[in-house]
Each structure stands twice: as structure tokens, then as C-alpha cells.
């Protein structure tokens, strides 16, 4: 989270708008219990404090549908994240 905050601050210092987001769930065989614990901890921390960014998207709550590989979003999952309620389009629209 500290790295994301530093990157965000640097991007904003250059005049960019930054929207941060949680990490979506995964279900592939390579995803370990430890990785999942880190994902959940990061998402929890980001939900608790993201005022340092211009916008926030909770992809974890959107829970996009995944392809059979357990990593990549389906077309419907991509649509949910990009244009669905609480998705990226809503976060961008709030900034413009």
C-alpha cells in the first residue's frame, strides 16, 4: 500500500488524476493461501484509507466473472468493472 501511495503522489504531483482500486479475487491453481491473505489485507487497508487518491474503485466487491483460467475477466466481468455500478466509468465521471 505504501508503494501505491508513493506512486500515486508522484503521478498527482505531475498533474495526473489517479483512481486506485482493490485487487479482484482469483481462483487459479497458482494462487496461494498466503497470496490471498495479502490481497485481503491490501483491499481492507485501501478501503479504510484511499482519500489520498482522486478516486476509488472496489473491484473486489464488483467481483468480476473470471474465465476458466481463474485470472482473466470474462467479457461480462470486464463490462461490470468498466461500466457497471461503482466501476471505473463512474469513478472517472466523478472527476470530470
Image: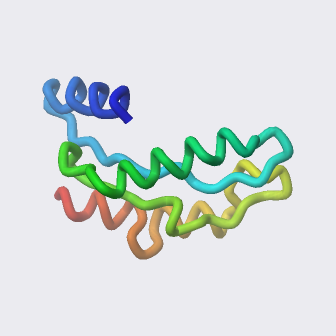
Q: Which residue is drawn at 29% across and 57% down?
A: 92
Report whether 5 appears left or right of 54.
right
Specify whether 54 is left or right of 73.
left
Rendered residue at 37%/49% (across/down): 45
Numbered marks: total: 0
Q: Looking at the picture, how far across and down is residue 15, in whole percent?
A: 14, 31
Identify the residue shown where x is 41% and y is 50%.
21
Q: Quadrant of the C terminus?
A: bottom left
Residue lying at the far bottom of the rendered structure: 85
With respect to residue 15, does 29 lie above or below?
Answer: below
Relative vertical location of residue 5 with respect to residue 24 in this rendering, above or below? above
Q: Which residue is drawn at 83% across and 50% down?
A: 69
Q: Nearer the viewer, residue 3 or 70?
A: 3
> Where residue 27 sits in the image (x, y, percent)?
77, 54
Question: How is colour applied across the structure in the image?
Answer: rainbow
Vertical position of residue 31 compared to residue 82: above or below:
above
**Residue 48 location, quadrant:** bottom left
- Classify the position of the N terminus by image quarter: top left
Viewer-proximal residue, 76 or 33? Answer: 33
The image quarter in which residue 16 lies: top left
Residue 40: x %, y % from top left? 54, 52
Amino acid at each position: 500500500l505504501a508503494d501505491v501511495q508513493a506512486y500515486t503522489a508522484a503521478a498527482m504531483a505531475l498533474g495526473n488524476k489517479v483512481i486506485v482500486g482493490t485487487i479482484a479475487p482469483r481462483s487459479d491453481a497458482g494462487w496461494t493461501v498466503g497470496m490471498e491473505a495479502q490481497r485481503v489485507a491490501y483491499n481492507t487497508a485501501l478501503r479504510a484509507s484511499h482519500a489520498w487518491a482522486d478516486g476509488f474503485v472496489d473491484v473486489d466487491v464488483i467481483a468480476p466473472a473470471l474465465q476458466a483460467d481463474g485470472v482473466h475477466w470474462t467479457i461480462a466481468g470486464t463490462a461490470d468493472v468498466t461500466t457497471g455500478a461503482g466501476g471505473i466509468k463512474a469513478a472517472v465521471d466523478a472527476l470530470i
